């Protein structure tokens, strides 16, 4: 028993009895312990076990231990790490690992206290608030705000700017406010609308979506109402975040195991796979967000040109993947089942009339086609409710 010492083992057992997640939970004033705390406690317990069994060699014979450790590091550990890093870099160059939506967050998904994330202010073509376009609030203009995800944000120009240019040609003095941001959903847009409710006077508020509110939940964070990357950015250990972001090996392994490292696997198991009401909860959350947005529009936001501020919700078109077809069908059908007192338009029927770059994003020519539908809505609102 040369590598052990009975006294050290007894001391180690003493500390293990005191420092473990079960004992600490008894003394915790706000149980249960967080996952991060449990992970830290388990790591400390492993160190206690290691030193209890090896203390005689590692502590009291530290020179010999240091010599052996140096030999292992120089001859095995460092060369292995170099090879692994080179392989990791090579794999990332050929497309392994996570796509850049986790890597480029700080430009298009910049953290913000009001709505979790939005574009970073004053970079790319973002204004001081982090959104595309100049926000002008002239007194005699018909002010239109559009809230949505990447389909609102993207475009050269975006859909809402095409609408503005067309109405200006028709001698309607209009200002538009593009509140779109990559990957955001209506739960975030409600907070965003409230954040700007006392900064801008608006005549028409448009909530455009459906994809991030339903389809994205089948692929990312599946908890209804949560931002798509909440589990990653707010709940994951920073070290694991970095590994998943920058290591193609770790990222690929996480993808192949459906999020076993990132924690996404556990979230899906607790929602999609075990909750029979999960899809219904998504639909309920979609309509809850729209009702909240309509109430904010009607009761808080002041009009700029019209007698009152109008609210419109629009379902976007998209090529829905198989995994989301059931819940998407529920969303479309719910339009005839839910009681609402605002204009709700289903533009998912436009799917076969336009072209996509992927499942949900449009080619620029198709944005022009979609803009015509938005133009009809905006012009009708102006002519019928603002004159």
Image (tube, rainbow, N blue to C red):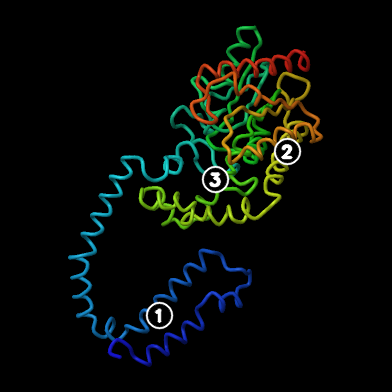
Q: CA distance from mark 3 to mark 1?
A: 38 Å
Going from N to C along the chain, the mark reached first, 2 or 3, is 3
**Mark in front: 2 vs 3:** 3
Q: Quadrant of the N terminus?
A: bottom left
Residue 17 visible, this orientation: yes
In terms of depth relative to the viewer, which is nearer, 11 or 50? 50
Residue 316 coordinates in the image, percent (x, y): 63, 28
Check disc 3 and report the residue beneath it.
220
Say which residue appears at 66% left-offset and 16% top-offset.
Answer: 141
Q: How many marks?
A: 3
User: x, y percentage for residue 241?
Assistant: 44, 52
Q: Residues within 10 Å of mark 2 (few under 14, many from 20)?
A: some
Instruction: Give the distance between the C-alpha atoms of the residues marked 2 and 3, in whole angstroms.
Output: 20 Å
Q: Quadrant of the C terminus?
A: top right
Q: To which residue does mark 2 refer?
A: 287
**Rendered view: 304 above or below 117:** above
Neighbour tally class for label 3: few under 14, some 14-19, many 20 plus, Cα within 10 Å: many
At label 1, counting other C-alpha atoms closer than 10 Å, the crowd grade (few under 14, some 14-19, many 20 or more) is some
Give coordinates of residue 264: x percent, y percent. Answer: 53, 52
Answer whether residue 195 is visible to the viewer in this image: no
Is 156 drawn above or below residue 66 in the view shown?
Answer: above
Residue displayed at 80% across by 35% down: 337
Please name the residue that numbered disc 1 is placed on.
49
* Cα distance in 3D space between marks 1 and 2: 53 Å
Q: Secondary structure at mark 2?
A: helix
* Mark closer to the chain start, 3 or 1: 1
Mark 1 or 2, nearer chain start: 1
Q: Quadrant of residue 183?
A: top right
- Helix, strand or loop status at disc 3: loop
What residue is drawn where x is 70% and y is 18%? Answer: 377
The answer to whether 324 appears left or right of 290 in the picture is: left
């Amino acid at each position: 028993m040369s590598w052990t010492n009975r006294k050290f083992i007894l001391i180690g057992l003493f500390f293990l009895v005191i420092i473990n997640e079960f004992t600490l939970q008894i003394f915790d004033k706000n149980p249960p312990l967080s996952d991060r705390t449990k992970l830290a406690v388990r790591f400390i317990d492993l160190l206690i076990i290691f030193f209890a069994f090896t203390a005689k060699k590692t502590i009291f014979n530290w020179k010999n231990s240091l010599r052996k450790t140096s030999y292992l590091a120089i001859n095995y550990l460092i060369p292995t790490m170099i090879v692994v890093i080179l392989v990791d870099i090579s794999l990332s160059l050929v497309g392994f690992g996570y796509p850049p939506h986790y890597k480029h967050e700080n430009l298009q998904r910049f953290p913000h206290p009001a709505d979790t994330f939005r574009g970073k202010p004053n970079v790319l073509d973002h204004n001081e608030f982090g959104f595309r376009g100049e926000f002008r609030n002239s007194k005699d203009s018909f002010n239109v705000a559009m809230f949505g995800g990447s389909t609102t944000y993207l475009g050269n120009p975006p859909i809402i700017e095409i609408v503005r240019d067309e109405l200006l040609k028709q001698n309607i003095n209009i200002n538009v406010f593009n509140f779109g941001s990559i990957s955001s959903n209506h739960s975030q847009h409600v907070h965003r609308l409230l954040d700007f409710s006392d900064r801008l006077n608006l005549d028409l508020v448009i909530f455009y979506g459906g994809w991030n509110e339903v389809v994205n939940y089948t692929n990312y964070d599946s908890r209804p109402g949560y931002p798509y990357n909440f589990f990653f950015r707010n709940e994951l250990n920073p070290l694991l975040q970095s590994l998943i972001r920058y290591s193609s090996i770790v990222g690929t392994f996480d993808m192949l195991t459906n999020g076993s490292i990132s924690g996404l696997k556990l979230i899906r198991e607790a929602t999609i796979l075990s909750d029979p009401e999960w899809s219904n909860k998504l639909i309920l959350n979609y309509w809850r967000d729209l009702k909240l947005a309509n109430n904010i529009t009607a009761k808080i936001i002041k009009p700029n040109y019209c007698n009152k501020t109008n609210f419109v919700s629009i379902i976007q078109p998209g090529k829905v993947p198989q995994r989301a077809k059931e819940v998407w069908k529920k969303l479309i059908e719910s339009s005839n089942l839910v009681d609402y007192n605002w204009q709700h338009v289903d533009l998912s029927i436009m799917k076969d009339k336009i072209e996509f770059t992927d499942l949900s994003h449009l080619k620029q020519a198709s944005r022009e086609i979609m803009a015509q539908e938005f133009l009809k809505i905006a012009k009708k609102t102006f002519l019928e409710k603002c004159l």
